[in-house]
Every structure is written in structure tokens, then in C-alpha cells.
Image (cartoon, grey):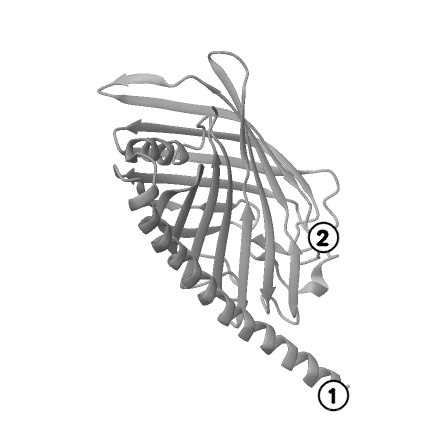
């Protein structure tokens, strides 16, 4: 038994070392790709005006622009002893459906792929899918406000789908609620807020007493069958961004969640910079960022985290 415990401990440490080595290499590789892509665009790129327009559309969550972002998030200091690490890759396809000349239905999906280690007592390492959030926004044509500004808004349902592949990767519950987004675009600026509220539906006894966060349903795995009151959570994402004429975008947002049952806030603040480039005829946005956990529940991430984003754009022809 002692030999097995030592082997398991060594395996955990190897996983953590691997994550700590892999993530900086990924960030360095993405940064290098941005530099190379920018240099290539200086000589082979499309007109800057076209790139700026695409970058501004990408800053608008309700744009009639099909896009597939891959968002890499790395955080540390997770768990009651702050010894855990987590790498979360959000696959976030956005697909607009033009209903008529005035209305568009936008589908936004977030499918997380999670690798995490020691995020809860005696939890070890997990790798797999997290729960999926599916949102639909019914959005009218932009409303002119004068001075070149446009109000853009949309609303619809949000669904939480328990697609997590492990007990510490899922809330074990379906959820549903309203979602809405409103923003103003004027010149190079985009300012807005996206929000939703999700309540659990159906059987609530399987979710245990685990508090779901970016990196798992945190808590003692032994408590997973003890029952809890379900899910009631409000998500609020205010955002602001500035897009330059050569398609650089500088952004700042928070991705705050309030757990009404646990009465706790989770507030990461994100600062990002991205560049829209062309690989042949394929527009791609490459970005990096840093985030600070201003507020987090016990066992959640602390301190600074890193973000990298690769987004493939498919503008209508």
C-alpha cells in the first residue's frame, strides 16, 4: 500500500511538472506565431481596412460572423492548500443564422476541455470534458444612436448541459435560464455587457456538495452523493475593447459569477491583446492575455492566470 501511495504521489507531481512546463511553451509558441504572422502580413496581408472591420466584428458577440475560438486558460494556486493547477481549453463556436432582413439568431456554444491536478483534497488528476453552456440570441438590426454609434442587443435562452466526463468535471445537472447582451460600437470602441442566469432543473440529488467553478466542481469527492440545493448562478461579463486601424484589439473584461446558493462571487479580471492576420485567404485572430482573480470562493484559483486565444473567422461572402 505504501509503495502504491508513493507511486501515485510521484505520478501527480509528474503531471504538475508537465503542466508547468507545457503551458509556458504553449504561450511562447503562440507569441512567436503572432510575431511571425504580423511580419508576414506586412508583406503579404490584405488591406488593413478589411482586417480592422473583421476585428471589430469579432469584438461584437452578436456580429453576423461565423467564428471558432479556441481559448486556452491556465491557473494555479487552486484548492484548499493552493497546490493545484488547471488548464482549461474552451472551444466556443459562434454561428449566426439570418432569419430575415432585420433579425438574426446567433448560436454561441462553450465546450470546455479540462486538465487539472490537486484541485480538491485527495482528488488526484482529471482530464476530460466539462459542462457545456449553449446560448441563443435573437438580435435585431443595429439601432443608430447618432454620431456613428450603434446599439446592438440580443436575448434568448441559455442551457447548461451536463457533458462533464468525471465527478469533478460536472455539476451533474441540466440548467436553463435567460441570457442577454447589449453593446455600443462607435469608431474603434466596443463597450457592452453579456449576462445570463441559470437554474438547475430535474434531479438535484446527484450533484453533491461540490461548488462548480472554472476548474471543476470543487470540494471533497467523498461528498459527491450528499446532495445540495441545486444551481442558481448569475454570470455578468462587462467588456470594453479598442481596435486599431491595423487590426490590433486591446480588451478588458470581467467574467463574474455569483452563486446565489453558496452566496459567493467568482471574479476574474482579464486583459487581452489580439491581432487579426491572414493566412492566405483565411482570417485568424491570435491573442494573449493575463487575468487576476479579484474574488474567488474557497478552493478556487488565486493570483494571476494566463490566457491565449486562437480564433478562426469565416466571414459571409
Residue of label 2: 227
Badge 1 marks a residue whose secondary structure is: helix
Expressed as whole percent of the image width and height from the top left, the position of residue 181 reads 44, 30
Q: Residues within 10 Å of mark 1 (few under 14, many from 20)?
A: few
**Residue depicted at 71% across the width and 58% down the height:** 224
Q: Residue at x 59, y 78 (%)?
A: 13
Q: Position of residue 114 (x, y in %)?
A: 60, 57
Label 2 or label 1, whichever comes before in sequence order: 1
Q: In front: 137, or 216? A: 137
Query: Element at badge 2?
Result: loop
- The residues tagged by marks 2 and 1 sit, at their Cα atoms, a distance apart of 35 Å
Q: Is residue 163 visible?
A: yes
Image mark for residue 3: 1
Give neighbour class at mark 2: few <14, some 14-19, many 20+ (Cα, 10 Å).
some
Residue name at image x 49 percent, y 71 percent: 21
Please name which of the two marks, 2 or 1, marks the residue nearer to the observer.
Answer: 1
User: As rendered, which of 317 and 249 lies closer to the eye?
Assistant: 317
Answer left or right for 184 relative to 75.
Answer: left
User: Farthest residue in the top direction?
Assistant: 101
Amino acid at each position: 500500500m505504501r509503495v502504491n501511495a508513493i507511486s501515485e504521489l510521484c505520478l501527480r507531481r509528474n503531471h504538475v511538472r508537465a503542466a508547468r512546463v507545457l503551458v509556458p511553451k504553449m504561450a511562447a509558441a503562440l507569441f512567436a506565431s503572432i510575431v511571425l504572422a504580423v511580419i508576414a502580413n506586412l508583406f503579404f496581408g490584405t488591406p488593413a481596412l478589411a482586417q480592422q472591420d473583421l476585428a471589430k466584428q469579432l469584438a461584437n458577440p452578436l456580429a453576423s460572423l461565423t467564428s471558432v475560438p479556441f481559448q486556452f486558460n491556465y491557473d494555479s494556486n487552486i484548492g484548499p492548500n493552493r497546490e493545484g493547477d488547471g488548464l482549461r481549453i474552451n472551444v466556443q463556436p459562434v454561428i449566426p443564422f439570418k432569419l430575415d432582413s432585420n433579425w438574426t439568431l446567433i448560436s454561441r456554444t462553450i465546450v470546455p476541455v479540462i486538465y487539472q491536478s490537486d484541485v480538491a483534497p485527495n482528488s488526484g488528476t482529471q482530464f476530460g470534458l466539462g459542462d457545456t453552456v449553449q446560448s441563443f440570441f435573437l438580435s435585431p438590426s443595429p439601432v443608430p444612436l447618432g454620431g456613428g454609434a450603434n446599439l446592438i442587443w440580443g436575448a434568448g435562452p441559455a442551457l447548461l448541459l451536463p457533458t462533464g466526463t468525471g465527478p469533478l468535471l460536472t455539476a451533474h445537472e441540466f440548467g436553463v435560464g435567460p441570457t442577454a447582451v447589449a453593446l455600443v460600437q462607435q469608431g474603434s470602441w466596443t463597450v457592452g455587457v453579456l449576462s445570463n442566469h441559470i437554474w438547475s432543473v430535474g434531479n438535484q440529488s446527484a450533484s453533491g456538495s461540490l461548488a462548480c467553478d472554472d476548474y471543476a466542481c470543487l470540494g471533497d469527492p467523498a461528498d459527491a452523493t450528499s446532495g445540495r440545493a441545486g444551481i442558481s448562478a448569475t454570470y455578468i461579463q462587462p467588456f470594453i475593447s479598442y481596435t486599431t486601424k491595423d487590426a490590433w484589439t486591446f480588451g478588458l473584461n470581467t467574467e463574474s459569477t455569483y452563486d446565489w446558493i453558496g452566496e459567493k462571487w467568482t471574479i476574474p479580471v482579464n486583459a487581452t491583446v489580439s491581432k487579426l492576420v491572414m493566412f492566405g485567404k483565411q482570417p485568424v485572430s491570435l491573442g494573449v492575455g493575463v487575468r487576476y482573480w479579484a474574488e474567488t470562493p474557497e478552493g478556487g484559483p488565486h493570483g494571476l492566470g494566463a490566457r491565449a486565444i486562437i480564433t478562426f473567422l469565416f466571414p459571409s461572402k
